[in-house]
Image: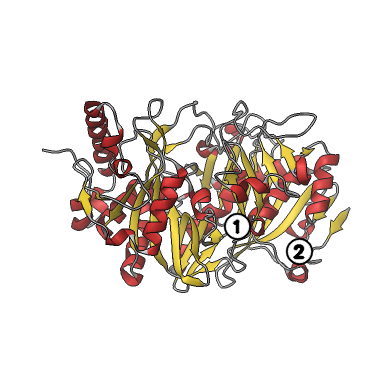
Amino acid sequence: MDHGRVNPTMKLDHQGITGLGAVYYNLLEPDLMQKAIERGEGTMGQGGTLLVTTGKHTGRSPKDKFVVRTPDVVDTIWWDNNPPMEPAAFDQLYADMTAHMKGRDYFVQDLFGGADPAHRLDVRMVTELAWHGLFIRHLLRRPERAELDGFAPDWTIINCPTFKADPARHGCRTETVIALNFARKMILIGGTEYAGENKKSVFTLLNYLLPEKGIMPMHCSANHAPGNPVDTAVFFGLSGTGKTTLSADPTRVLIGDDEHGWSDRGTFNFEGGCYAKTISLSAEAEPEIFATTQKFATVIENMVFDPETKELDFEDSSLTANMRCAYPLDYISNASETALGGHPKNIIMLTCDAYGVLPPIARLTPAQAMYHFLSGYTARVAGTEKGMGKEPQATFSTCFGAPFLPRRPEVYGRMLADLMARHGADCWLVNTGWTGGSYGTGSRMPIRVTRALLRGALDGSLAKVEFVRDPFFGLMVPKALPGVPSEMLNPRETWADKAAYDRTARDLVARFEANFATYADAVGEDVKAAAIRAAA
């Protein structure tokens, strides 16, 4: 039995997916909420939110993500980063998953990936869980109702959490699987309820497809000055580094919080919503994001709440530190209606330095920008990925998004270098991690300090102050900025034990040096000269 609005010539039956129970096409938020609660998938929270948990998977499963080795992609996929699956194994996986689906109810959302109509991807998401349908409806871009009548998907994604893969039968690693088949234009997700796999699958697709059109896909947030989209800033960074928080500055217009493209027309958001981390979220520090946790149909994922009052506990990480909320972009009052911006005037590279030795902000030369983009140093915050411990782990994730890169990093690095050279942009490295010591000794960089430094960078005032060279990392660091304590600008001055700072800084320098050996042969001499290396 079919329900809802759909192109009558493009139902699941027409795609060869038959024998299902009820199929609900393109339900709106109230109906998706009702179905999720009726089916016991979640609990109604304050303000009409939906409270859900995802079981053992509270983060992405990057080691369970595969790309099907087909002739069309065999020479272009970065196989060292994307484990291969044979076409026959995928065909078996598809046959077994669609057999598993028979007789069960499913929810279909027909959506756009990309705010620029010239470059968007038409995506059909087929989900076993109603709340997954609600989640992806928030996170991708929603067609007008009339557009659904002729919607024909470029790609189809099927997500069956109750399906358990068989490694021997399906060529995967565990009972959890995410398999991308570029030849069949299909993604299969099984054995995980974590909703982030849905959006990241679309991001991975765009990361592969857009470079062929000369468009750079970016794991970044973006905003622009009020009334002036030409004054656009992008913020590269992994989860937990501050992309969502810092781009949602109430003094600027939010383009998007996580995934964007940079074309010859400028910047455009891939998404229609935000997927914000909520651990330690407060009304004082982030009022607009906090407010979404009491708005209708916001999906609250893996948060502890009072069973009687439904009050959320923003400090209880017993389920995961990767607790999140998903909401449409227009829940943020300063969000752009078009999700379009100009060519970036400022590029911000966010790092969460768990060692506490990098400065809170540094100005980068073009060569340094390329070096830090390829290095992608940060600390993976606890809980973002399955199997991580309680403490942050220092890591290098090239292009600030290695798990989502189907092509080699040099492809994206060259695109960034070309675009920066063509359009010009100031580039800044910003540390949102620790100061006064490493994790466990120091404290997290105050948001107010980071915001003040960023405002100085974006309004041009920071570029006018005196800079000094950091002796360990070769970074140009401002000596002073009104409103920011001068000792905060030099991380060594925030440490009580200066010798400990020096040891820790030298250790991180060595890590940078060892990591860059991977890319040294693929970059120009200017980038090699900008590399961080130990003193001779």
The residue shown at (40%, 29%) is 439
Query: Which residue type carries mark 2?
Result: Met
Q: Residues within 10 Å of mark 2 (few under 14, many from 20)?
A: some
The residue shown at (70%, 55%) is 137
Q: Is residue 344 left or right of residue 313?
A: left
Asked whether residue 310 appears in the rendered view, the answer is yes
How many marks on residues?
Answer: 2
Asked whether residue 91 appears in the rendered view, the answer is no
Q: Is residue 189 left or right of residue 172?
A: right
Query: Which of these two is toward me, 61 or 444?
Result: 444
Q: Position of residue 266 (x, y in %)?
A: 46, 70
Query: Which residue type carries mark 1?
Result: Lys
Q: Earlier in the sequence, mark 1 or mark 2?
A: 2
Element under disc 2? loop
Q: Position of residue 161 (x, y in %)?
A: 69, 38
Q: Residues within 10 Å of mark 1 (few under 14, many from 20)?
A: some
The quarter of the picture where the C terminus appears is top left
The residue shown at (86%, 55%) is 2
Query: Which of these two is toward me, 306 or 264?
Result: 306
Query: Which of these two is toward me, 104 or 349?
Result: 349
Q: CA distance from mark 1 to mark 2?
A: 15 Å
Q: Are marks 1 and 2 in contact (CB under 8 Å)?
A: no
Q: Quadrant of residue 434?
A: top left
Q: Quadrant of residue 345?
A: bottom left
Look at the image and name its color scheme.
secondary structure
- Which residue lies under the disc numbered 2? 10
- Which residue lies under the disc numbered 1? 185
Mark carried by residue 233: none
Give above or below for 440 relative to 466.
Answer: above
Q: Position of residue 191 (x, y in %)?
A: 65, 35
Q: Residue furthest left?
A: 536
Q: Position of residue 321 (x, y in %)?
A: 56, 32
